[in-house]
Amino acid sequence: MATTVKFTLDGKSRSVKVEDPAMPLLYALRDDLKMKAPHFGCGLAQCGACTVHVDGEPVRSCVMPATAVKGKKVTTILGLGTPEKPHPLQTAFVEEQVPQCGYCVNGWMMTAAAFLKKKPKATDAEVREALAGLKCRCGTHVSIMRAIKRAQQQMGGAA
Amino acid sequence: MNAPMDFSASRREFFKASGALIVSVSMAGFVTEALAEIGANKPPLVPGELDSWVAVLKDGSVSAFYGKIDMGHCLDVAIAQIVAEELDVGFESVTVFQGDTATSCNQGGASGSTGISTGAKPLRSAAAEARRILVEAAAKQLAVPVDQLSVLDGVVSGGGKRVSYAELIGGKFFNSKVEWNKQVGNFMDIKVPAKLKSPSQYKVVGRSFRRRDVEGKVFGTMDWITEISVPGMLHGRVIRPVIAGAVPLKVDVGSIKKIPGAKVVREKNFLAVVAPKEWDAVRAAQTLKVEWSAATNPYPAMPKLHDHIRSAKVVKAETETNKGDVDAVFKTAARVIEAEYEWPFQSHASMGPACAVADVKADSATLWTGSQKPHYARDGVAVLCGLPPEKVHAIWVMGPGSYGRNDGGDAAIDAALLSKLTGKPVRVQGSRSDATAWDPKGPASVHRARAALDASGKVIGYEFISKGFSRVHIATNEADPRDSLAGQELGMPTNPVEGFGTPEDNYSFSSRRMGWETIAPLLDRSSPLRTSHLRDPVGPDVHFGSEQFIDELAVATGEDSVAFRIKYATKPRAAAAIKAAAEKAGWQTRVSGTAKSSGDILSGRGISYTERRGTIVATVCEVEVNRKTGRIWAKKFTVAHDCGIIINPQGLTQTIEGNVIHGLSRTVLEEVRFDANSVTSVDWASYPIVDIQDAPLSIESVLINHPEVAPTGAGEPTIRSIPGAIANAFFDATGVRLRTAPMTPERVLAALAAAR
Ligand code: FES
Ligand code: FES
């Protein structure tokens, strides 16, 4: 009954054997493929900690079945940038020393990255709207906003 | 100094080992190997040995062994700064190892904002002592008197000669005793012959060195507790009853037989499933059919919670402050003002459910834990497994922030019990509901305040009494399995302790009394509403009342809220902080609630001043209240913060900011919901916290530095000043007092309607 799901993960082709068609992508990424950055926060699409991009769109991998990414491009934060070639958001999050515990930070950066790609010149209010629903229990929201502004400047967005 | 012995652990090897995918497993292996290699030569890991605190490696780099942990508050960096300062080595050359029972003594873990205030003390002394020993050794070797030697970046020089720390001792043990004060935990300290530096000589302390954990978090390369994986490991999920206090009567093992490798594990009332694959453990937990015992309806109807607290029998009462003749003053008062405030149960609700991995063998055990008190977690596992503590190795690995005793302690004990019962290494990570419904809670409470005024309006009497559930019905750490859900499910006797708290004695009213009363838990065993420490235990709760009440007195006597506080503040440093916050915020002097705005959006500003074990915080909050929706938006905070000497300003600023937002969330949104027989706050929808839309536009921090004053802590002091500041700003905006937290839109609308 197991099906093999082939997809591209951070630019490399990978495959996972899926026993239960209901298994969320998050478990394929974490348990089978040992990816660290998408975290389990709620399993209910309520926090964003598990966010990855599927074909460029941010999705909550805790509720998307693994089988749904067959043939698609999945990007995690490792695919977003590296210390050598960082995404402007990563540079900005480091500059602003954003994360406290950091368990949430994947969700904020992945969601913001997808949004800024579409709308680099977004106003603060638009950014807040786009990020609504993401959780940060340590309360780093103000520095998240500072970092996003900084990244927008680097990307040639935001006034 | 005795003959130095060889010590092969080099930092490079440490890093090489930790580069592996399974960081902590490798590190644990490395530590064990290193210990075996140096075996008999290493002095025992006890606080009375200098080698337990600091080491100089072959390459001259320095290791500091910290028995607390940092969860993103820049504490390890601050410790490195302090050690570098006293040792006269470069900041970059100091590595701080933390939270591993094989490399550090039990300094209490993360607890009580003591990461620096008490946590840095033995490390500072140890670094100074190491310097003293090394400079004396250099004097001998160079034949130059000590008073002609100086140290820069780990090189001792004088009289035209020089020798480095690496040459003097690199890779060898000091084998030197220090005087331990015999305390374990937060107050562990040592005394040394070396003289500590005066703050006026500081070059490294006081600067904003950057955190060392940020890149790994931002680039997704860090290993978290959730990444720990041990060969042969099973995934476990503990099944807690839907009905509080219910126990499993019948378990239908066949209901999960289709799930590969899934098994039921049961010991008395402890029930769990394990499976080789994580998803299979999750779905087995969801699928398993269990017949539970009937509901006993242990909880009052939620709207009656505070009435229950008011009428419940007092189990323990304590008066912490009693000055003057309070009762007499109230009899002769020209005017008496009274108010009562209510605070709900609150959850730690960490960003992710806690995780732990345990490998329990017949004669030893290893625990990987995200608990903020790993040494105590080791002790708890040792008791649970009947092992001596030294046979249990606990390794702290960064997990979701915990803010007190969250579900991390239970995860550790659950994992150890499952490993013991299955004979395999077991990884446990809870569900969202384990983190929100089942963590130990901050206690609900009621606060009665009254003040006596003389004919001139002077406050001559003050009384503030809190009544609620104890803050420690469950101990603040997991050293005893009785204080864990698993222990209670196994039938261990419970061990509730009674304790609460009062505001600190901040105001100089001539007669004043502050005290507390605790009541019995609603359910004495395995209760999702059992109470323990939540960040700044009872601080926000108490000061939501006390700082509103001070404001009520200011208004009643026709005084400005800032001026009133300064008038009665007992210390010049407090008055200075209040002034600093007010000035920075552009405070408009007037009686609060007198400049009512019109339209749907009402604006106001409020102040609050609090202390916590020597740290003084004054906060000004500016709010907008939407009259139509009831939403309070705290737009701006200005925090003046005085915690003595500042070690790292940027770390401090961000610690303050986290406190502000956590405090905002707890003031306007957070309330654990329940019905007669269960907690119904099970996720983020039923336990809402602050969203980016609710976050303030800015938080301005005024850092007041007192290099001559020992550091008093910053992890918690700000949070207790937030509820009062918001509530007072709400009053200023609306002219209405809201004395029940959280100040949700529903409560705001009801309060505004009632005042109409
Ligand atoms: S874990 Fe997926 S949204 Fe919370
Ligand atoms: S930094 Fe801890 S949850 Fe956001």
Image (cartoon, coloured by chain):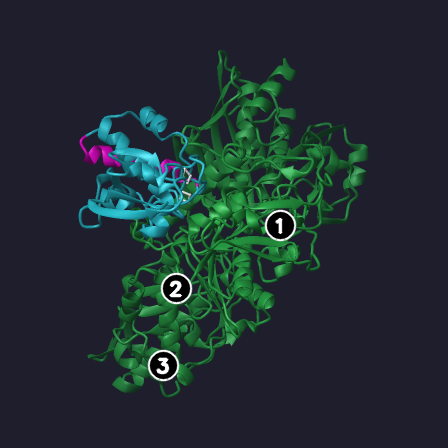
Chain colours: A cyan, B green
Q: Are marks 2 and 3 in contact (CB under 8 Å)?
A: no
Type of the residue with mark 2: Pro
What residue is shown with label 3? Answer: B37
What residue is shown with label 2? Answer: B231
The answer to whether residue B174 is visible is no
Counting from the top left corner in percent of width and height, residue A57 is at: 28, 32
The reply to whether label 1 and label 2 mark residues of one chain is: yes
Which residue is located at x 56 percent, y 19 percent? Answer: B734
Distance Cα–Cα, label 3 vs label 1: 49 Å
Q: Quadrant of residue B29?
A: bottom left
Depth check, front residue: B290 or A105 = B290
Return the disc, 1 or 2, that comes first in the chain's sequence: 2
Q: Is residue A70 left or right of residue A43?
A: left
Specify start and end residues of the magenta stretch as a single range.
A139-156
Return the disc, 3 or 1, that comes first in the chain's sequence: 3
The image quadrant where one finds the C terminus of chain B is top right
The answer to whether residue B189 is visible is yes
Instruction: Report the image quarter containing ligand 1.
Output: top left
What residue is shown with label 1? Answer: B251
Q: Is residue B317 left or right of residue B19?
A: right
Q: Is residue B557 left or right of residue B65?
A: right
Distance Cα–Cα, label 2 vs label 3: 24 Å
What crowding class fits label 3: few (fewer than 14 Cα within 10 Å), some (14-19), or many (20 or more)? some
> Magenta-highlighted stretch: main secondary structure?
helix
Type of the residue with mark 1: Val
A142 is higher (above) or lower (below) than B121:
above
User: Is A149 colored magenta in this rendering?
Assistant: yes
Counting from the top left corner in percent of width and height, residue B116 is at: 45, 57
Q: Chain of mark 3?
A: B
Secondary structure beneath disc 1? strand
